[in-house]
Amino acid sequence: MNTSNKTDLSISMNQASLYSLVIALPIAFMFGWFYSTRWGFDQLMFGFDSFFANLFLFLLTFIIGIILHELIHGFTWMLAGRKPFNAIKFGFQLKTLTPYAHCKEPLKVNAYRIGALMPGLLMGIVPSILAILIGNSWLIAFGIVFTIAAGGDFVILWLIRNVSKNKFVEDHPSQAGCYIIEDNLPA
């Protein structure tokens, strides 16, 4: 597609990693604070101790979680954007050690937003809220870790916050963010 009809709303993966901490860490600290207020700081620390206690189980949980995170992006874009499976590309950017899901076809911006939000919601925010309600210390650690892991997605949502819902976007192939397509595309 010709780049003259696109506006680039993306940042480098390194920038996204830095900005993601600015957005995700306060959310993670808020979850930790709410959990500690209700269940006690010692219980919060017990959750993190148990989450990180066995290096093998932590790495297994983290790797499976990251794969699931990217699958959620892809499948949500497929469903919300009504795209075929072959429109989604999964991979790993070795230079920045960043896994990714990439939609190769333009999407309505709200379908893109839903796909960007869903992993952080399902793997970070919902488990954290559930842990606060029921007092599960391992679950709060899981929720906080995957809220932080979704920080780059929160940055992308911030980048596109002012894009009209009628616009189409094209996922950027190598950076965090997307192109806003200025021409009208068929729905």
Image (spheres, rainbow, N blue to C red):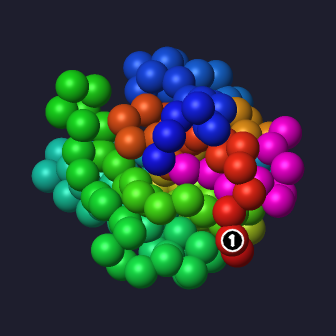
Q: Residue furthest left?
A: 56
Kindly identify the residue that appears in the image at 18 percent across and 45 percent down.
55
Front residue (pair 24, 98): 98
Front residue (pair 169, 1): 1
Amino acid identity at mark 1: Pro
Kindly identify the residue that appears in the image at 83 percent across and 57 percent down.
165
Front residue (pair 149, 181): 181
Q: Mark 1 points at which residue?
A: 186
Q: In this view, does 132 lie to the left or right of 143?
A: right
Could you say whether the residue bearing mark 1 is in a helix, strand or loop? Answer: loop
Query: Residue 25 location in percent, x, y?
Result: 62, 30
Q: Total of numbered circles in the picture?
A: 1
Is any part of residue 154 visible from this angle? no
Query: Residue 139 location in percent, x, y?
Result: 51, 62
Q: Is residue 98 left or right of residue 59?
A: right
Query: Residue 42 location in percent, x, y?
Result: 57, 42
Say whether residue 165 is magenta: yes
The dominant secondary structure in magenta is: loop
* Quadrant housing the C terminus: bottom right
Kindly identify the residue that appears in the image at 28 percent across and 27 percent down.
96
Is any part of residue 22 visible from this angle? yes
In the image, residue 166 sits, relative to residue 55, either above or below, namely below
Q: Give the range drawn in magenta.
A: 162-170
Q: Image quadrant of residue 135?
A: bottom right
